[in-house]
Amino acid sequence: MLTAVREQDAYTNLALAAVLRERGLGGRDAAFATELVSGTVRRQGTYDAVLAACVDRPLSKVDPAVLDALRLGAHQILAMRVPTHAAVTTTVELVRTRVGHGPAGFTNAVLRKVAGHDLAGWIRRVAPDPTRDPVGFAAVAHSHPRWVVEVLRDALTADPTELDALLGADNASPKVTLVARPGLATVEELVEAGGTASAQSPFAVELGSGDPAAVAAVAEGRAGVQDEGSQLVALALTRAAVEGRDSRWLDMCAGPGGKTALLASMAAARGAQVLASERQAHRAGLVKRATAAVTEGLTGVITADGTRPAWAPGTFDRVLVDAPCSGLGALRRRPEARWRRTPEDLDDLVPLQERLLRSALEGVRPGGVVAYVTCSPVVAETSEVVERVLADRVDTVLEDAAPLFEGVPDLRAEQALLPGTVQLWPHRHGTDAMFFALLRRHDR
């Protein structure tokens, strides 16, 4: 799995789930394998700093397969309840089998040095002085690239002391949250299948253990796996008041389809219809699969570029723009993203986000609403995008979104970088770091 993530740009959570099913692993074995893979990827930055102090050459000169194994061994030694001798022995044997006898001896020597200190001791030795370089210290201690620490710190301007808590939450294994799609499944049904109802989303159930695909409602598409933050932003759009007609909804960037399925199931109860649009054909296919059990409330799924809409201006009453973003709000679920994203990615993403939001505002009628959503708390992708778009429009206002998140504690809306918007956080709310802004069109 580590090789697939490194060489094939595999997504850890998706690829690992497939491998676990292929190998027939379940229960404790699946949980152990998941922690081995996900934990090693999450903590890669910290482990590389430790390993660099234990080898006599730059890590770039170490065979990539051997480096993968060293990281795997370091994670077991420093962060899991695996006995040191077992972690060293199995890692050395892995290298001997996959790479060769010479690298196996090297692996043994390095991991025995790693075992010389615990994780806290190593961080004290290899991280910068926290009083002189707090960002550098946090980057090593919490295994985030320095630039990611900086942009997350900036998003926490209201209370920068939360940074450690946020970075720590990014490294925690995420809970598995199911959504009971209204009209198709109930929370009670998912609770009977072994889940625990949430106090935040009325559709959310936390699954304590087991394979979600083994839950009948999930297997049948009446329920799905969906982060609670994703549920909350879709629900917030449906709670916003609109003036007049309320029958035409648009999910502009619909892939992979979780929000579409939830919106459509809620729309059906109101006699409304959702059109799902997705630019990439393969992702549009994912939307179709995610909504296969939704027999009402869905107009259809189209492959279209939201910046060049296939619909007439003023067509919709509600529009969701879940814009492509850096994904830095979902590092718990996609641990590899922190190592793949670069600051330069924002140079392409931010202009696209602005174009999508402007297009959405053209697509909604006067009296209707647009929800701008990102799975990123980065200021450049959130409040700054909304502010620039609003500055050019005299027919659009930003409304206070906090009342739409009834039941969600500690929103601190009054401290938001852009008052009226909502930012969810993994360390506060147990969700992905979803950003939400509600914009309302008026007559020109």
Image: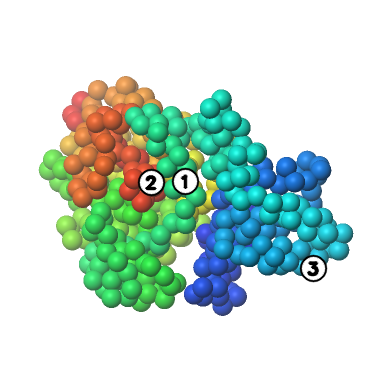
Disc nearer the start of the sequence (3/1): 3
Q: Amino acid at mark 1?
A: Gly
Q: Residue at x 27, y 40 (%)?
A: 411
Residue 410: quarter of image:
top left
According to the picture, the residue beneath numbered tag 1 turns out to be 168
Rounded to the nearest whole Å, what is the CA distance between mark 3 and mark 1?
Answer: 35 Å
Where does the image place residue 275, in percent across and percent down from the top left? 32, 53
10 Å neighbourhood of mark 1: few (<14), some, or many (≥20)?
A: some
**Do we see residue 310 in this rendering?**
no
Q: Amino acid at mark 3?
A: Thr
Q: Residue at x 41, y 60 (%)?
A: 175
Query: Going by the picture, which residue comes out furthest to the right?
Result: 102
Where does the image place residue 78, in percent across and percent down from the top left? 61, 54
According to the picture, the residue beneath numbered tag 3 turns out to be 97
- SS at circle 3: helix
**Do we see residue 203 in this rendering?**
yes
Q: Amino acid at mark 2?
A: His
- SS at circle 2: helix
According to the picture, the residue beneath numbered tag 2 turns out to be 427
Disc nearer the start of the sequence (2/1): 1
- Classify residue 316 as left or right of residue 335: left
Q: Residue at x 79, y 55 (%)?
A: 109
Residue 273: quarter of image:
bottom left
Disc tally is 3
Rounded to the nearest whole Å, what is the CA distance between mark 2 and mark 3?
Answer: 41 Å
10 Å neighbourhood of mark 3: few (<14), some, or many (≥20)?
A: few
- Classify residue 347 as left or right of residue 406: right
> In the rendered structure, are the residues bearing label 3 and label 1 in contact, judged by CB atoms less than 8 Å apart?
no
